[in-house]
Image (cartoon, helix red, strand yellow):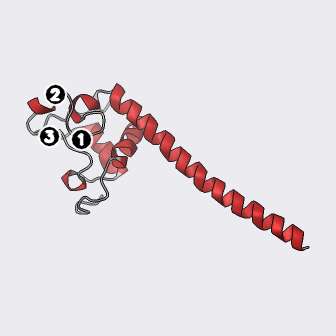
Amino acid sequence: MGIVLSVLVAVFVTGCGADGESDKNKANDESASGKALFIRNGCAVCHGNAGRGDGPVASSLKPPPRDFRDRASYKKGRGVEAISETIKLGVPKSAMPAYPHIVPADRRLLALFIESLQSENSSDDNEE
């Protein structure tokens, strides 16, 4: 009976670890897909490849593009839903256009990538 219990515990522990790994792999895959969409949709032209607001045309834009690492600079919220909505609607009185043609699933992946760029050291003001 002790062997059976040991096997069951081992299976349970291994299974739990695998789920955590699976979730981490899924998050990494989604972030990579979001980054590819970020490049493909031209976001990097303004925001730069790393989302620092330093793309090739950034210096010509007023106000300048957002540095996605700065959590305090998100005007409409910094969570996935808020970022996705900003991508859809754009930002009035800025150079950020609306992208309503990007399907919701792709906007979500873009938002997940952008959220992954947020610095842990930035202000926690302006939650979703």
- Residue 77 horizontal side relative to residue 3, left or right: left
Tag on residue 68? none
Q: Is residue 126 above or below residue 62?
A: below
Taking the view exactly as shown, the residue that stands out farthest to the right is 1
Q: Alpha carbon of mark 1 to alpha carbon of mark 2: how far?
A: 13 Å
In primary-sequence order, the first of circles 2 and 3 is 2
Q: Identify the image quadrant of residue 41.
A: top left
Disc 2 residue type?
Val
Foreground: disc 1 or disc 3? 1
Q: Which residue is mark 1?
A: 52
Disc 1 residue type?
Arg
Disc 3 residue type?
Pro
In primary-sequence order, the first of circles 1 and 3 is 1
Pick the residue in front: 102 or 116.
116
Tag on residue 92? 3
Q: Callout 1: 10 Å neighbours few (<14), some, many (20+)?
A: some
Q: Is residue 117 above or below residue 94?
A: below
- Residue 96 horizontal side relative to residue 79, left or right: left
Residue 91 visible in the shown view: yes
Tag on residue 57? 2
- Residues at marks 1 and 2 touching, judged by CB atoms closer than 8 Å: no
Q: Alpha carbon of mark 2 to alpha carbon of mark 3: how far?
A: 19 Å
Residue 103 visible in the shown view: no
Which corner quadrant holds the N terminus? Answer: bottom right
Q: Position of residue 88 (x, y in %)?
A: 29, 38
Q: Position of residue 27 (x, y in %)?
A: 49, 46
Q: Is residue 7 above or below residue 115?
A: below
* Label 2 SS: loop
* Label 3 SS: loop
* Label 1 SS: loop
